[in-house]
Image (cartoon, rainbow, N blue to C red):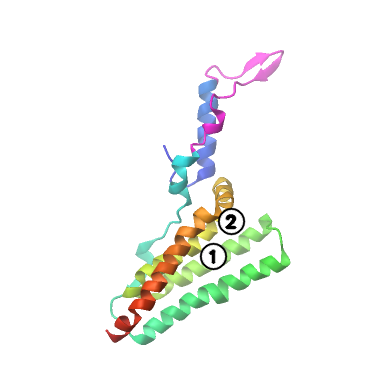
Amino acid sequence: MAPTENLSDYFASKLTQNFMAANPGGPTLKNGMGSLSVPQNFGEISGIGEVLSNVIDPKIDNKKIKVAQNFTADDIMAYLETSRSAIEDDLQPQLDSLAMNQPYLTLDSFAPLLSTYGQIENKIYNSKVPAPFKGFNSALLGFVSSQKIFFDQSDPARALVAMQNPTSILEPYKLALENEAQKLERDMPKILSS
């Protein structure tokens, strides 16, 4: 059973199952002290390779995205301004402030970051997305949501795995965002003329 939500719960469950299998009669007494046998293949208990893609991918709620089939040039400009603002005005100052004031992340810095990421996601979800920008919008949400994983206090194992593999977490969303931006740049004259 691979996890679909919480990697920490999954690891705890797998570890418990393996310890129970290695100690079917429970703890034993050795020299008057309780003792447990360590499961065989202890290092493979997590099955990390099979579970990463299920728990690392951010969940994007496509039902919340408001796609506009009919839109004007002003709608496009408003959407682009909202997207720009989400990153440059909302996220970047928070990250810059954190870097200047706290060179090392602490648990106290996680809550404000998660709050900022949540606000940015809401801003993106609540924007009216012109239909040709749907792919870009999904890529932008994936890029923002994938960064939240690093600060997820409700699933510390997931955050740890993400911190140990930042490129594999962020790169697919960064590339998708760049590809969508290039596609929009190429198609913009056609989009504006329709």
The answer to whether residue 177 is magenta is no
Residue 30, quarter of picture: top right
For badge 1, the amino acid type reads: Tyr
Which residue is depicted at the point 47% across and 80% down? 81
Q: Secondary structure at mark 2?
A: helix
Residue 34: x percent and y percent?
67, 19
Write the start and end of the magenta stretch as one range.
23-47
Closer-to-camera residue (183/117) = 183
Q: Find disc 1 in the rendering and name its residue.
A: 117
Residue 67 in picture, x, y percent from top left? 33, 72
Element carrying mark 1: helix
Question: x%, y% of residue 36?
Answer: 61, 21
Q: Main secondary structure of the magenta part?
A: loop
Disc 2: which residue:
151
Q: In this figure, what is the number of numbered marks?
A: 2
Callout 2 amino acid = Phe
Query: Which mark, residue 175?
Result: none
* Residue that extends furthest to the top in the rendered view of this protein: 31
The crowding category of the residue bearing disc 2, from other C-alpha atoms within 10 Å (few below 14, some 14 to 19, many at least 20), is many
Q: Is residue 100 above or below residue 55?
A: below
Q: Position of residue 184 (x, y in %)?
A: 37, 75
Is residue 75 depicted above or below 132 in this figure? below
